[in-house]
Image: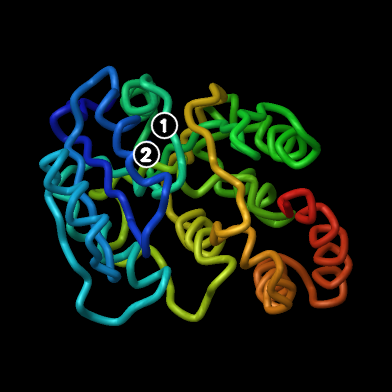
Amino acid sequence: MNHYHKSEYTFVICAYGESPYLEECIISLRNQSIPAEIILVTSTPNKQIDLLVKKYRLKYFVNEGPKGIAEDWNFGYQKAAGKVVTIAHQDDIYEPCFAQRNLEEINRAGHPLISFADYGEIRAGERVISNKLLNIKRIMLLPLRLRILQRSRFVRRRILSFGSPICCPSVTYVKENLPEVIFETGYRSNVDWQAWEKISRRQGSFVYCPDILMFHRIHLESATTAIIADNDRSKEDYAMFCKFWPKKIAGIIEHFYRNGEKSNEI
């Protein structure tokens, strides 16, 4: 049993540009059932962010070093003081019990590496809890409902070998069991999948909470939508599958994976 305390939990909001949904995200984190530290980091400081930071009295850090998705996420991760850290995406909404449920599952696990939850989507302002892509991801994660399998490197690597069913903004990191740098530069669409692959090699648990604890927003301006529309996505997917499979098999799996990801398009 672990004994991570609620005072050791930090949410890091990675803000970029001017998002019309940022304040909604902040409010959802402030409404958690347990108090958690909230910090905001950005590489694009602007008036909207300044106003919200002052309004909600958030700790605020500007990344003045190299810019990019991986760089910004690593910057936020390193600025978090807590031992248990969630990198929140600015457009998403977190259920009030998100931090509490994750902390409970982490404290039950043996040597936890990351914790992640089931999730829904927000499309055109409506919450969606079931569609083809969400259901496929839930099926892929079924083995991790068993705690004994959460410690298995073989099981989690087999899951990741068919794609990434782990929702990045739902992930909580147990910092003392992880490297200082989580995300590698050079990836755009698969920054998160690359991280899970790297972490999956370590000894410890991939803690899965099958409750829907957050909602990921899909909209025309979101990074997810823009990246899927980019042809470079297929190249990165293929490179990831090659970490698990021979090249010919990786190419076949990538073809079917690409068709499945189209359900994320608007």
Residue labelled with disc 2: 25
> How are the colours assigned in the image?
rainbow
**For residue 3, above or below residue 217:** above
Quarter of the figure with residue 34: top left
Quarter of the figure with residue 32: top left
> What SS does tag 1 mark?
strand
Q: Are marks 2 and 1 in contact (CB under 8 Å)?
A: yes
Mark 1 surroundings: few (<14), some (14-19) or many (≥20) residues within 10 A:
many
In this rendered view, identify the residue nearer to me: 167 or 249.
167
Front: mark 2 or 1? 2
Q: Position of residue 102 (x, y in %)?
A: 38, 28
Residue in the picture at 36% in, 21% down: 96
Residue in the picture at 16% in, 38% down: 56
Residue labelled with disc 1: 94
Quarter of the figure with residue 244: bottom right
Q: Position of residue 229 (x, y in %)?
A: 71, 68
